Every structure is written in structure tokens, then in C-alpha cells.
Image (spheres, rainbow, N blue to C red):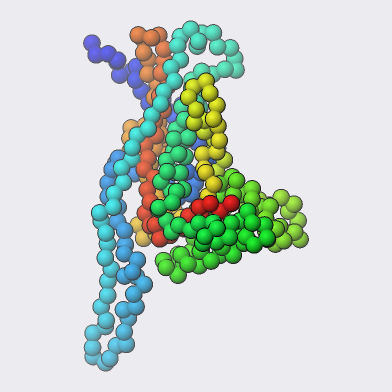
Amino acid sequence: MPNPMPGDVHINVPLTNISIAYIQQQMKFIAGQVFPVVPVQKQSNRYFVYEKEDWFRLEAQERAPASESAGGGWRIDNTPNYYCKKYAIHKDIDDDTRANADQPIDMDRDATLYVTQQLLLKREKIFVDNYFVTGIWTDVTGGTDFTKWSDLTNGDPITDVDTYRNNVGALTGYEPNTLVLSPGVFATIKNHPSIIERVKYTQRATITTEILAGLFELDRVLVPKGVINSAAEGLDDTDFIFAEGALLVYAAPNPSIMQPSGGYSFSWVGLLGAGSEGNRIKSIRIDEIESDRIEGELACDLKVVATDLGVFFSDPV
């Protein structure tokens, strides 16, 4: 008889639903909010990129009587590809602990939330490594390319964002619509005299991300506040996941074959039992250790698509 039996290993839909709800409520994590999520049926595949130069080149010509119209067209690059790596972690619930747990403790729920939190941390760290670093987008450095925003006399974050937003628009035809600010940069900007001067006559005493978005003429300003403990077990070295910086980028409102975007987040939903974020929760009975294993998985690829649609501000404060 095979071991384990099919009934001993299965995708737990109720626990997966708890996991999805938890992901959607975690507003401190922004990896799933910045770029459009592209649900994919296959773990890997290609996607198409239209060459933007062909769309902006003026090919239309005056047409003489009894003559053909000017011809034109565009090129498509079909070599870009994605690969949704699977990330996983589990928590074992032994029979003794389950039997001794009092209400309202729910070991399956708590284990689901724990593994989901771990996967959220992993995805957020991948976002930082893939997007929120130098060497990816157009890089500008505080103190060299612009006055640091911590300079309360000469720093001018509104003008700087406006300048680089226009630069990207002139280069690509798409102005950035999203600004990601690390927590420290956000704290500096919202207390900057140039910002306070703009809003001092409004009814809002607190400068929010929505107010900043309006001042910067953007759709969104996002501030990631997830934290991570980088120390070994038993030690504490907790800090924000995002180091000081700012990313100004165009993010498509929705994924589309004809819609450019600085990045796309591919989520493998074609995996058996996977949720909308490419995540799933499995329940596994392990009799050898008298435990139930709650295992969480996340299959995704956070992909840079168009580097010319973004500007990364390093050392802004």
C-alpha cells in the first residue's frame, strides 16, 4: 500500500482562503500592490514586448493622387520570459499540542497565518532585490543629481519628482504614476517645509500618502512598512525591509498585451489548488512524528519589464 495515501496529502481550500484573505489585508507589504499581477497557467512561458521606438517614429506622409499610402509597422520581441519559482515553508502541529490547545486557539489557522507571513516576507524581500535597488532603472543620487530631501532649506522633493516624471514621459510617452517611498524617506518628506507650505491651508492636519500623491501629480504613493528580523534564532535585529530610497515608476493599472509597465508580477495560478496570488496551503499527515504539517507555497516571478519607465532615487535623505 502506498504511503502516504492520497487522503493524507491534499490542498486545503479553507486554509488557502484564510491565507488569501490575510495576504489581501496586509497593507504594510506592497510587493503585490505596485505592479499588475498577471495570473498564469504555466510555471514558465514567454511574453511579448513591442519596440516603443516604432510606435513613436513618424511614418505618415502626404499622399499624392493615384499613389500608394506610406507603409509602416512595428517589431515585437518574443524572447522575454518568466519563471515562477516556488517558495515554501511549513509548520508542524504535533498531536499533544493540538490536544492541549484551549479555545480560542486554532492551531491550523495560526499555522496558516504563520506560513503566509513568512511567504509575504519572502515576496517583499524579492521585490526589494528586483526593483528597489540601483542598477535597474535610471539612477539618480542625492547630493549629486539632486539636493537631498533632508536638506530642509534647499531640498525640493516636489520639483525633483516633477522633473524626473517629465523626463520619463519625454522618453517613453508614459509618465510615472506611482511613487514608492521607504518609511524614513516618507517621514522626511511629509515634514519638509516645501510640502507643509503647500497644504497648510487645507483641512487635513496630517499629511497622508493620498495628499502626497496629489501634490506629486501621481495616482499612488506607497510606503512599505513590513519589518524583518535578520538575526539568528533567539536574537533580534528587526528593521524595515526597505532601505532608504524612492522608486518613481509607471505601473500599468491592469495587465494587457498592449500596455507597457515598469514591471509585472507573474503568479502561477495553474498549479493545482493555487489561489489568486499563486499561493496554496497543504495539509499533510506525518504519522512518524504524530503531527499534522501545514505547508504554505507561493509561486511567482516579480519581473522587470521596461527599465526606462522608472527612476530610482538613492540616498535621498
Residue 224 in the image, given as x and y percentages of width and height: 55, 43
How many marks the image carries: the answer is: 0
Question: Can I make out residue 256 in this image?
Answer: no
Residue at 48% across / 7% down in the picture?
96
Residue at 53% across / 66% down in the picture?
163
Residue 217 in the image, given as x and y percentages of width and height: 58, 62
Q: Is residue 175 above or below residue 233?
A: below
Q: Is residue 106 left or right of residue 211?
A: left
Q: Is residue 245 above or below residue 239?
A: below
Residue at 52% across / 42% down in the picture?
242
Q: Quadrant of residue 266?
A: top left
Q: Nearer the viewer, residue 176 or 14?
A: 176
Residue 95 in the image, given as x and y percentages of width and height: 46, 9
Q: Is residue 100 left or right of residue 174?
A: right
Residue at 41% across / 66% down in the picture?
172
Q: Quadrant of the N terminus?
A: top left
Q: Is residue 281 above or below residue 311?
A: above
Residue 279 in the image, given as x and y percentages of width and height: 41, 34
